[in-house]
Image (cartoon, rainbow, N blue to C red):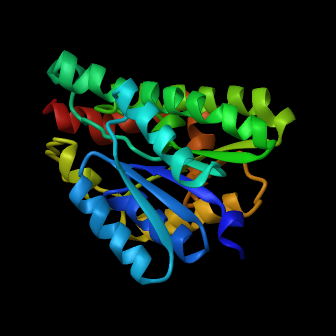
Amino acid sequence: MEQSAKPVAIITGASSGIGEATARVLGRAGYRVVLAARRLDRLQALEQEIRAAGGEALSVETDVSDLASLQNLVARTLEAYGRIDLLFNNAGFGRFKWLEELDPAKDIAGQIDVNLTGVIQLTGMVLPTMIQQKRGHIVNMASMAGYVATPTYTVYAATKHGLRGFTDALRREVGVWGVRVSALYPGGVSTEFGSHTEAKRLTGITTPKALLLSAEDVGNWVLRLARGRRSRNVPLPGVAWFGIWLNRFFPGLNDWIIERTFTRPERGL
């Protein structure tokens, strides 16, 4: 493939976890990857790794909650490559505590700014290029919390439910221009994400190992979507559909199960 014809992908949250794994997957698949995150040293190490493997990468220090930083990311990408074929809105974080324990600025406003507002802002900035190209793909990193909202996930679930609505509406706006929009809804993923949630579990409940995904599992799904798989909303793993259906068709039963297996034990009741 000629250099100018190689597709270009922007990946936010690329310094670790799913973003880092996806950068490797796309780099091996021939994408020129733009690595965006706040930890520039990690991005540069990943950039060197991708280049050493024969790929092409560009590191751009980015704070997705800052408008000027997002504008710089898009400008640097277009300056370097002149096109944007894939945007993977992956950056995000969660604070999994009771609502009354969340800090109003750091935990509540912070999650909304990073998980939802930043996604909307960055997507709006890349759309003019994709519309002009009459092609492109936006993949949003949602969560099973975007379908099934559970205790201690109040604000996180609100951002992921909002992201699901944004994804569906945007897809119906831009499909006429050849721009595709998808979202991934993974359950538990083995990354450092969980070490930053500040969750304190009396019950010790965690995702069963049989259902735990790897970061590369999710990265491979991003590549499948980028290569043309016609999926709008993708819960991962597939068995997660059972939880979605239970929540949708038997909400009272789901409430009862969650209250007795999680809320009451965790509240010490």
**Residue 162 or 45: which is nearer the viewer?**
45
Q: Is residue 92 depicted above or below 20 in this figure? A: above
Q: Residue 39's spot in the image, x, y percent?
A: 23, 51
Of all residues shown, which one is farthest toward the bottom? 53
Q: Which image quarter: residue 108? A: top left
- The residue shown at (55%, 64%) is 32
| Left or right for 91, reference 45 | right
Give left or right: position of 120 versus 113.
right
Residue at 22% from the left image edge and 42% from the top image edge: 197
At 34% from the left and 73% from the top, the residue drawn is 48
Extreme front residue here?
79
Q: Is residue 214 visible?
A: no
Nearest the camera: 167 or 262? 167
Q: Quadrant of the C terminus?
A: top left
Please state which of residues 206 and 6 is positioned toward the viewer in this rendering.
Answer: 6
Q: Position of residue 13 (x, y in %)?
A: 37, 49
Asked if residue 101 is positioned above or below residue 254 in the image, the reply reads above
- The answer to which of 200 and 192 lies nearer the viewer is 192
Residue 116, given in percent of the width and then of the height, sits at 45, 28
